Image (cartoon, rainbow, N blue to C red):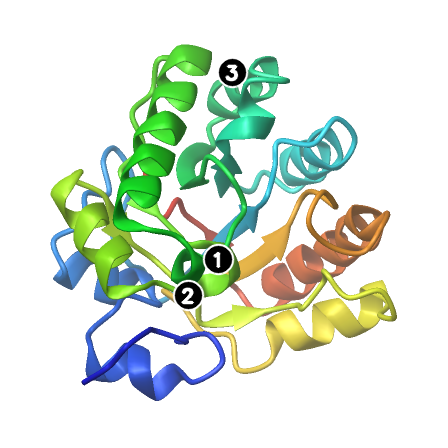
Amino acid sequence: MIRYLLAPVHPPFARALNLPRTASLQSAAGAPVARWPPASPTAVAITFDDGPHPEGTPAMLEILARHDARATFFVIGEQVVRRPELLRRMLAQGHAVALHGYHHRLHLRRSEAELREDFTRGIAAIEDACGATPSLHRPPYGIYSPASLRIVGELGLAPLLWATWGKDWRKFTTPERIARRALRGLAGADVMLLHDADFYSAKRSHERTAAALDLVLESMKSAGLGTFLAGS
């Protein structure tokens, strides 16, 4: 019996359970991709976790605008209630908002009642901030418990993990290293994970991510890869 899902560290678990890590898997799982193209062989879904952040999120939005790129932001409810205007800015600039939870806590340490309350509070925070209802969910640390995965489905959310990531939350890393890791093996229809906040990671890590995002988008452009939204 599988007791928990550690898909980002052990991708075979995600494949075996058909837990979406790419946009094509997301579409096959029936998750809505409203208003935007489905998985494309020439586009990548760039996603950010842990915001909104007063410095990191505006920096990412400015860089994305400069490159005419779109992204999906998996936000934390407790941060949303502090700066709801950033969610409205995300949507106004053509990006999508998804749920990362109300608190950034490991699902394995939480009861079913706590998880349900966390998800419903997170959804409400997003709806109150910008009027949008999220359709996608990603758990903190990329780890679901059996209860949390079931509740996500009951609430009409589709789980989405990632195919590549920059591990930009680390203290001892550089923009160049983040970009190399995020681009390694990247292909069309993949989902890329970055972070626009340092609330739950190394201090000022969002500054390195911002510098890496410029490198990532330049490299993608050279490779003929564009961006599309994982959800809305």
Residue 139: percent from left, percent from top: 42, 54
- What's the distance in space between the residues labelled 2 and 3, CA to CA? 28 Å
Q: Secondary structure at mark 2?
A: loop
- What's the distance in space between the residues labelled 3 and 1, CA to CA? 28 Å
State which quadrant residue 22 falls in: bottom left
Q: Earlier in the sequence, mark 2 or mark 1?
A: 1
> Residue flagged by tag 2: what amino acid is it?
Ile
Q: Tell me, for residue 83, which label it has, or none.
A: none
The residue under label 1 is 106
Residue 164: percent from left, percent from top: 52, 71
Which is closer to the viewer, label 2 or label 3?
A: 2
Quarter of the image with the C terminus is top left
> Residue flagged by tag 1: what amino acid is it?
Leu
> Relative to the observer, which residue lies in front, 137 or 3?
3
The residue under label 2 is 143
Residue sitting at x 39%, y 76%: 7
